[in-house]
Amino acid sequence: MPKIKFTAFATDTKSGERGHGSGETTVSHWISRHDYPESIRRDLERQGYKDVHVDNLTTEG
């Protein structure tokens, strides 16, 4: 599974604060490279963020 490093802007649904951060994640091999930002956005929304914008993707592996 590819490891992806990314940056994102998002709003914390509890505090309402907007912020910028970076992270890394892995995605399943069946997800196409084109869909990586959408997959990461959905994961962040499940963690309690909204208005997520993912950028600066780099892939390892």
Image: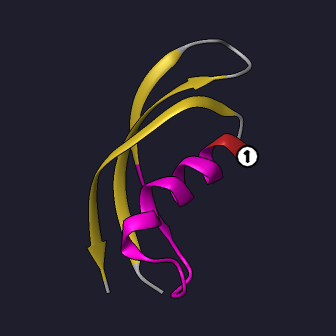
- The residue lying at 34 percent from left, 61 percent from top is 5
Query: Badge 1 is on which residue?
Result: 46
**Residue at point 40% right, 39% down?**
8
Q: Quadrant of residue 28?
A: bottom right
Q: Residue at x 68, y 13 (%)?
A: 15
Image quadrant holding the C terminus, namely bottom left
**Residue drawn at the location 70% of the way across and 22% of the way down:** 13
Figure quadrant of residue 14: top right
Tell me: residue 40, above or below residue 34.
Answer: above
Q: What colour scheme does the image use?
A: secondary structure
Q: Is residue 46 magenta?
A: no
| Direction top: furthest residue | 16
Q: Position of residue 59 (x, y in %)?
A: 29, 72
Residue 16 locus on image (x, y percent): 64, 12
In the image, residue 27 lies in the stretch drawn in magenta: yes
54 lies above or below 16 = below
Counting from the top left corner in percent of width and height, residue 21 is at 40, 36
Numbered range of the magenta stretch: 23-44
Point out residue 17 in the picture as x, y percentages from the top left corner: 56, 13
9 lies left or right of 49: left
Amino acid at the residue labelled 1: Arg
Position above or below: 54 against 13: below
In the figure, 44 relative to 28: above or below?
Answer: above
Frontmost residue, 53 versus 58: 53
